[in-house]
Image (spheres, rainbow, N blue to C red):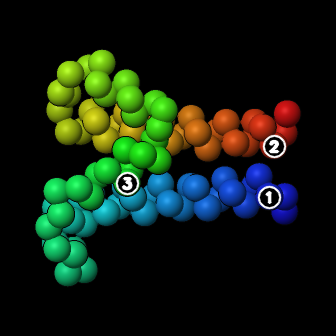
Amino acid sequence: MRIHGLLAWIYGGLCAGALLLIPAEAHGWMGIAEDPYVGVFAFFLGLPWSLLLYALGSPPLWLEIVLVMLGMAINVNGAREARHG
C-alpha cells in the first residue's frame, strides 16, 4: 500500500471519528462530557471547504454537518485522485 492510500485511510478515520463525536457529545454517549468545541475538529478536517459556511451566514446545524461531511469527502477523493493521477 502506498503512502497516499495509507494517509487517505487515516484521514477518513479521523473524519469519521470527528463526526461521531458530535452526536456522542450531544447525547452523552460513552460518558463523553459536554464540550461546546467538539465540532471544531470536524470543521478543521473539512478545510478549505468548510470555510464556505461563513458565506452562508448561520445555516441550520444539520446543513453545517452535511457541508463539512461533503468537504471531507472532497478531500478524501482528492487524495485518491492524486494517488492515481
Mark 3: amino acid: Phe
* Cα–Cα span, label 3 and label 1: 23 Å
Q: In the rendered structure, which disc, 3 or 1, sits on the residue that comes first in sequence? A: 1
Which residue bears the numbered disc 3?
41
Percent position of residue 75, x then y: 58, 39
Q: Secondary structure at mark 3?
A: helix
Which residue bears the numbered disc 2?
83
Quadrant of the image occupied by residue 25: bottom left
Percent position of residue 24, x then y: 25, 66
Q: Secondary structure at mark 2?
A: helix
Which residue bears the numbered disc 1?
3
Q: Residues within 10 Å of mark 1 (few under 14, many from 20)?
A: few
In percent of the image, x 65 and y 59: which residue is there? 9
Percent position of residue 64, x then y: 28, 36
In the figure, is residue 56 to the left or right of 78? Answer: left
Mark 1: amino acid: Ile
Which marked residue is nearer to the observer: mark 2 or mark 3? 3
